Amino acid sequence: MALDLSSLPAPALIEALDYETILARMVSDLVARDPSYSAILESDPAIKILEVAAARELILRGRINDSFKATLIAFSSGSDLDQLSAFYGVTRQTSETDADLRERIVLRIQGSSTAGGASWYRYQGLSASARLKDVAVSSPSPGVVEMAVLSGERIKVESETGTALDTSATYYGLTRTTGETDADLKTRILAAIANQGSDGTATTQLVNEVNTHIQGDAVRVLTDTVNTVSATITPADVTAVVYLYPDTPSSVFTGLEASLTAAFNAAVGLGWDLTTSWLISSLHPSGVQRVELSSPTSNIVVGPSAAVALNSVNITLGGYDR
């Protein structure tokens, strides 16, 4: 598992910025240089000049902070993070977020210190395809490595248009027909993905892509036998009745299913348990009076090579209450 960078203490070199403190030090310095300013008023022109200087110093100190942050994996972002990742031999994948890239950089560093440790194989697995959501690495017996692959194929396809969608169609053995719209082609691709299992089940194409990469001489340790498989998927049906406060707008209820799905997609991963408390919390934005969850009735606990998938979501409005 990659190091949680958020658990590290804040760097001492990044200073807290306070305009009032900077201005007070400048005023104190001025009084020390010219005691006649001991009874200085805020309306004095000298104070106005110092206020401008203090504001500009605050901006400069902030820029120094930002420059230093750009050199740290935990804080760097955008093209600065791309430059930093290149130093470690890591390249950002298509549509890869800063958070995901940071994780792969850390895994790359950790994995380089051992001859085929879990971090090494996890980094290589996540680097094999932009269609992955997560990878779990285990060793059921000495010399045997099992890589469980959690698919992010549906999410990736849903965000694609144009030539990117054509590329995905080719990946799954499909071709855009004459005059076919993005929406129609996307529907066919998603159907091809769904035919191979529940959401999160890796397609044969994805498993083969990852396996081909892992079996390469530059990746697989000579004495290891690596097996690449799809993650085990546990479907979950969510059924809940939601009550709103009398003055809550109806838009709060109508947006609940979409917000729950988005929160689930962001949180789900291999070994992540779907708990009833998480579901109730996710269905409880401001304006919700209470949530009565009838399914699942208990926490859905999965193993390290398994993941939960939302099979169905049924949220009904129970009424208004205080």
Image (spheres, rainbow, N blue to C red):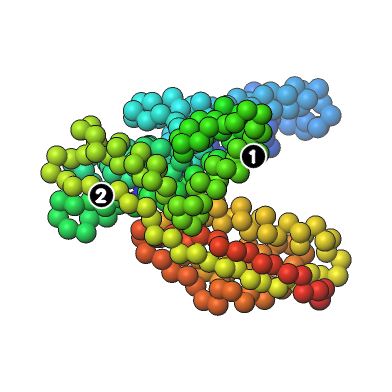
Question: Disc 2, disc 1: CB below 8 Å?
Answer: no
> Amino acid under label 1?
Asp
- Front position in the image: 159 or 322: 159
Amino acid at pointer 2:
Asn
Extreme residue in the left direction: 223
Count every numbered label the image shows and give the total. Answer: 2
User: Is tag 2's residue or tag 1's residue first in the polypeptide sequence?
Assistant: 1
User: What residue lies at 19% left-to-right and 52% top-to-bottom?
Assistant: 144
Picture coordinates of residue 180, whole percent (x, y)? 64, 32
Q: Is residue 55 above or below residue 9?
A: above
Tell which tag, 2 or 1, sits nearer the viewer.
1
| Residue of label 1 | 184
Between 16 and 287, the one lying in front of the other is 287
Q: Is residue 30 visible?
A: no
Element carrying mark 1: helix
Up the image or down, 115 lies above or below 78; here it is below
What residue is drawn where x is 45% and y is 64%? 234
Q: Position of residue 184 (x, y in %)?
A: 64, 39
CA–CA distance in space, label 2 to label 1: 36 Å
User: Residue 227, labelled with which disc?
Assistant: 2
Q: Is residue 69 left or right of residue 279?
A: left
At 55% from the left edge and 73% from the top edge, which residue is drawn? 296
Using a 10 Å C-alpha cutoff, classify the residue at mark 1 as few (fewer than 14 neighbours), some (14 to 19) or many (20 or more): few
Mark 2 is surrounded, within 10 Å at the Cα level, by few (under 14), some (14 to 19) or many (20 or more) other residues, namely some
List x then y, in percent, for residue 192.
51, 46
Quadrant (top left/top right/bottom left/bottom right) for the C terminus: bottom right
Determine whether the residue tagged by mark 2 lies in a helix, strand or loop.
strand
In this rendering, the answer to whether 310 lies above or below 117 is below
Q: Position of residue 17 (x, y in %)?
A: 60, 37
